[in-house]
Image (cartoon, rainbow, N blue to C red):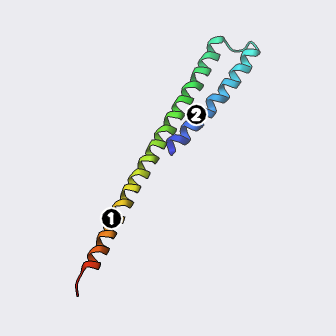
Amino acid sequence: MEQMKTQQNTFELSKQLVAIIQQRFQLNSATDLEVREAQKSFEEAGFRLLNVQYIAKVAEIELQRICNNLNKVMVEKVKSKKTTILNFKF
């Protein structure tokens, strides 16, 4: 979660940087190279954010799968204990 917050902040900052550099470019205060570098930084930040979000979703799905498997095991154990208790002769 911390990585996602960090990458989200980085993405937002790089987005702001692109806007600032583009304004500077329009005022003839920035070069084509500076604009391209800011855009590249923005794209890379976007890819990193998507990657972190993807990894988090995969982890969430895996956790749900594991919990579902544990629930199935617990249900089977409860069923087998009920069967054992019901078959017990006094």
- Which residue: 49% across, 43% down? 57
Name the residue carrying label 1. 76
Report, in whole angstroms, how far the alpha carbon at label 2 lies from the one at label 1: 47 Å
Instruction: Using the image, determine if residue 21 lies above or below residue 89.
Output: above
Q: Are marks 2 and 1 in contact (CB under 8 Å)?
A: no
Which one is in front, 15 or 49? 49
Q: In the rendering, at what x and y percent does residue 77 appear?
A: 31, 67
Which one is in front, 62 or 74? 74
Q: In the rendering, at what x and y percent does residue 22 appear?
A: 71, 19
- Counting residues from the N terminus, which is met first, the one under dot 2 or under dot 1? 2
Instruction: Using the image, determine if residue 36 lies above or below residue 12.
Output: above
Q: Amino acid at mark 2?
A: Thr
Q: In the rendering, at what x and y percent does residue 80 appear?
A: 29, 69
Name the residue carrying label 2. 10
Secondary structure at badge 1 equals helix
Extreme-left residue of the structure: 89
- Which residue: 65% across, 26% down? 17
Total labels: the figure holds 2
Instruction: Using the image, determine if residue 38 lies above or below residue 2.
Output: above
Which disc is residue 52 wearing? Answer: none
